[in-house]
Amino acid sequence: MFTHIDTDFGYDDLHYATEFAKRHYLTPEGKAYPSITTVLSILSEESIAKWRERVGEEEADRISYRAATRGTAVHEIIEKYINNEEDFKNGYTPDILSSFLDLQRILDSRIGRVYAQEAPLYSDHLGVAGRVDCVAEFDGKLSIIDFKTSKKAKKSEWITNYYIQETFYAIAWEERTGMPITQLVTIVAVDSDNPQVFIEHRDNWSGKLLETIDEFRRRNS
């Protein structure tokens, strides 16, 4: 059983709208902030365009849909498990259950007290918003925890976008709660292979986060 700590953000949720593939969240004060995923999309636009051209639009859509659907399902089952729901396995296909079982040992042995799951966060300082997967103790240290799925094992240099995104969550969390977080944890369920855990420090990526936000604003001004 996981222990949950109540965290008060001063709001229950953030409303959002998506237009032209760009998502914006509305803060309780009425400010519209772009989502962190929308901001970070500028870092991969060129490579994604080249990939889609190489494999073809129809195949790219098929692969993207499958990856997104699987990722959402794995996130859901993990969230239910950490929420201590007894029927967390119900309704999931064997491949999703397999991915979960690959990660279960890590969840059980390394995650401690849980402060939030799927929590909406925003930063007035950065002018960005988003929704964090999990905030919990990992190896005894309060951390931003992100769950990912992949067809093959990752190298750290391939997933720098993850670290930048998690850095935003850490900054927004501290702004909203007053609790500093410096440890970033990325847990990856890999098809037919052992899961991976990447641990980074927030301050190694804050500069790149600010650069990316500035570039996003320049392109959309």
Image (spheres, rainbow, N blue to C red):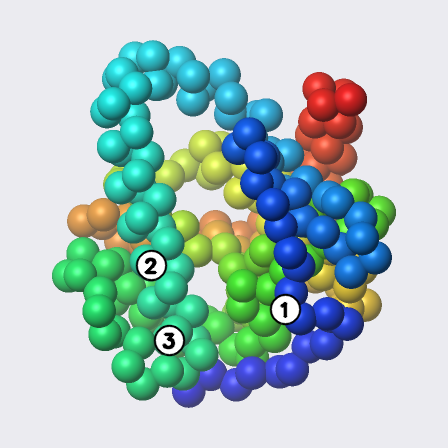
Label 3 and label 2: CA atoms lie apart by 11 Å
- The local crowd at label 3, few if under 14, some if 14 to 19, many if 20 or more residues have their Cα within 10 Å, is some
Residue 83 appears in view = yes
Query: Image check: 142 left or right of 198?
Result: right
- Amino acid type indicated by mark 1: Leu
Residue 188 appears in view = no
- Camera-side mark, 3 or 1: 3
Residue at figure coordinates x 39%, y 60% from the top left: 75
- x, y (%) of residue 16? 62, 50
Residue at figure coordinates x 73%, y 70% from the top left: 11
- Amino acid type indicated by mark 2: Val
Question: Mark 2 falls on what kind of element?
Answer: helix
The residue that mark 3 highlights is 81
Query: Image check: 135 left or right of 80?
Result: right
Image quadrant holding the N terminus, namely bottom left
The image shows residue 88, relative to residue 46, as above or below, that is below
Image quadrant holding the C terminus, namely top right
Q: Which mark is residue 216?
A: none
Label 3 and label 1: CA atoms lie apart by 19 Å
The residue that mark 1 highlights is 142
The residue that mark 2 highlights is 74
- x, y (%) of residue 6? 65, 82
- The local crowd at label 1, few if under 14, some if 14 to 19, many if 20 or more residues have their Cα within 10 Å, is many
For marks 3 and 1 on the same chain, the one whose residue lies earlier in the sequence: 3
Residue at figure coordinates x 59%, y 56% from the top left: 131
Image quarter for residue 34? top right
The image shows residue 143, relative to residue 166, as above or below, that is below
Residue at figure coordinates x 72%, y 76% from the top left: 8
Image quarter for residue 91? bottom left
The image shows residue 49, relative to residue 115, as above or below, that is above
- Camera-side mark, 2 or 1: 2
